[in-house]
Image: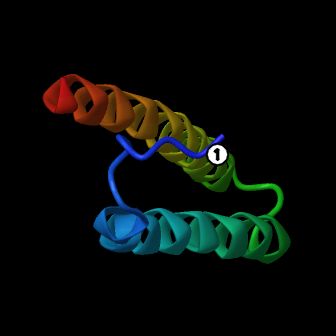
Amino acid sequence: MSDPAVSPPGSWKYRRRIVYGTLLYCAVAVPALTVWRPDAPLVAQVVMALVGLATTVIVTYALGAVWDDKNARSAKQ
């Protein structure tokens, strides 16, 4: 379902890099921290924060795309 009113893919180039970089950081840091100090309460809190960060980034990325597409369609009309 390609809509010509939607912003071009190049406009999301840098946003995608930031999102992928953040998710990669979380994907590496969570297992590393759990292997390094599995019993430390502070590490457990940091892991929970990193999972929250990853979840927030994914949700914001999806909703940001929808919002950006909606604004692009409104601008065309």
Q: Is 40 positioned to the left or the right of 8 in the image? A: right
- Name the spot of residue 57 as percent of width and height, x first: 49, 46
Q: Is residue 68 above or below residue 71?
A: below
Around disc 1, counting alpha carbons within 10 Å, would you say few (fewer than 14), some (14 to 19), or many (20 or more)? some
State the image coordinates of residue 61 (x, y, percent, origin top left): 47, 44
Apparent side of residue 39 relative to residue 48 in the rendered image (left or right): right
Question: Would you place residue 51 above or below residue 18 in this image?
Answer: above
User: Residue 63: horizontal and vertical position, in percent?
Assistant: 46, 30
Q: Is residue 14 shown above or below 40?
A: below
Q: Which residue is mark 1?
A: 51
The amino acid pointed to by label 1 is: Val
Q: Residue at x 24, y 29 (%)?
A: 71
Q: Quadrant of the C terminus?
A: top left
Residue 3: percent from left, percent from top? 49, 41
Question: For the point 60% across and 39% down, which residue is it?
Answer: 55
Q: At 57% across and 44% down in the image, what residue appears?
A: 58
Secondary structure under tag 1 reads helix
The residue that appears at 62% across and 73% down in the rendered structure is 24
Q: Nearer the viewer, residue 18 or 48?
A: 18
Residue 50 sits above or below residue 13 on the image: above
The answer to whether 47 appears left or right of 22 in the picture is right
Q: Name the quadrant containing residue 51.
A: top right
Q: Quadrant of the N terminus?
A: top right
Q: Nearer the viewer, residue 25 or 43?
A: 25
Q: How is the image coloured?
A: rainbow
Q: Is 6 on the left-hand or right-hand side of 43?
A: left
